[in-house]
Amino acid sequence: MSQRWDELLKRDHEVTERVFAAMEAKFSCADPPPPALVGLLVQYLHYVDQCHNQKEELHLFPRLEQMGMPRHGGPLGVMLQEHDRAREILARLAPLATAYAAGDRQTLAELAAAFAEYAALCKDHFWKENDILYPMALRMLDDGQAAEVVAGIEQVEAALGAGTRAHYYRIAEEIVGRAELADLSFGLERDVLAAILNTLPVELSFIDHEDRVRYFSHEHGEKIFGRTRGAIGTAVHNCHPPKSLHLVNQILADFKAGRREVAEFWIDMSGRMIHIRYWPVRGDDGRYLGTLETVQDVTAIRRLTGEQRLLGPA
Ligand SMILES: [Fe+2]
């Protein structure tokens, strides 16, 4: 089934926002962004201005105007003003980026500032389109007009060459991949990520693919099972009593062989119900990276009944 016009335009926004996030991380990093990456960015921004914005300006906005939305003032006027403003910033940004990509490092500070201004404007603009303009347009346009917008979108892309969208989406993916933002957690500072793990209502321990203890959470908080830094680096077999060793070995062997996706236990600890689970951690390519242990006191969760929809006491 072919996609709706708003889905196509929102997808453009989403891909562009990923490019912005990747480049924002690169520009704020101590190491300057690689020139080749900035070269890819200039190419991609050409798509935003010459393709994405054109789809709206040539095929969506005029139809909204026909249906009675004024071109000046109101949401349409704001969107057009922002497209113009983005074009102005891009006119400044593109030559700086091209010079940087060609090896001129002097442009970095000015380039980073222009990029930050461009990305901030576009992100705010995309949000307004996604949440305000497109929902209004969906109510105003009938099925025939909606189909005309889709045809117009295809026409703008075709005018720039066959496979235009796929081509630029590939560039976007390359930027994101090179900036190592393929996963959202790459965009977080390590101390923020560590604080998130320590905020989970679950205690975590991780052993690597060689069965060595590498990490545990809540180091400075109260824990269900005490752990000290001395455990880091030791073989997991040394941390378990001999009577449970065969179980540990069996779980790890099953995880490594891909025979099991979780091993689960629950125990009564002086009236507290403790839920302990082991999970194989695998990379994107399915490679076994290690085993994660999660330990949670589920006593209070097991007691829950009915619903709580109102904010309880602090
Ligand atoms: Fe847009």
Image (cartoon, rainbow, N blue to C red):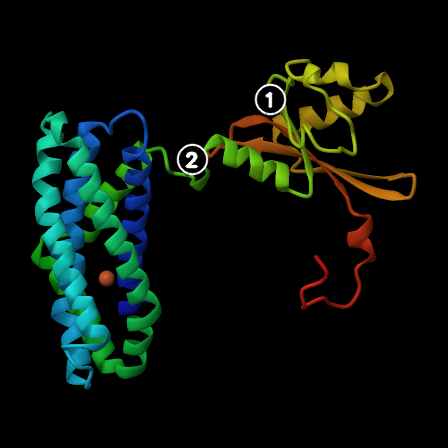
Look at label 2 and name its amino acid.
Phe
- For label 1, being within 8 Å of ligand 1 is answered no
- Percent position (x, y) of residue 202? 69, 40
Label 2, residues with CA under 10 Å away: few <14, some 14-19, many ≥20: some
Label 2: state its secondary structure. Answer: helix
- For label 2, being within 8 Å of ligand 1 is answered no
Q: Is residue 149 above or below residue 95?
A: below
Residue that numbered label 2 is attached to: 186
Where ligand 1 lies, by image quadrant? bottom left
Q: Picture quarter containing residue 82?
A: bottom left
Q: How many marks?
A: 2
Q: Residue at x 83, y 57 (%)?
A: 303
2 or 1: tag closer to the N-terminus: 2
Residue that numbered label 1 is attached to: 208
Q: Is residue 50 above or below residue 23?
A: below
Q: Residue at x 65, y 33 (%)?
A: 259
- Percent position (x, y) of residue 105? 14, 26
Outermost residue, bottom side: 68
- Percent position (x, y) of residue 211? 65, 18
Q: Picture quarter containing residue 172?
A: top left
Q: Is residue 135 left or right of residue 151?
A: right
Look at label 1 and name its amino acid.
Asp
Q: Residue at x 71, y 18 (%)?
A: 236
Label 1: state its secondary structure. Answer: strand
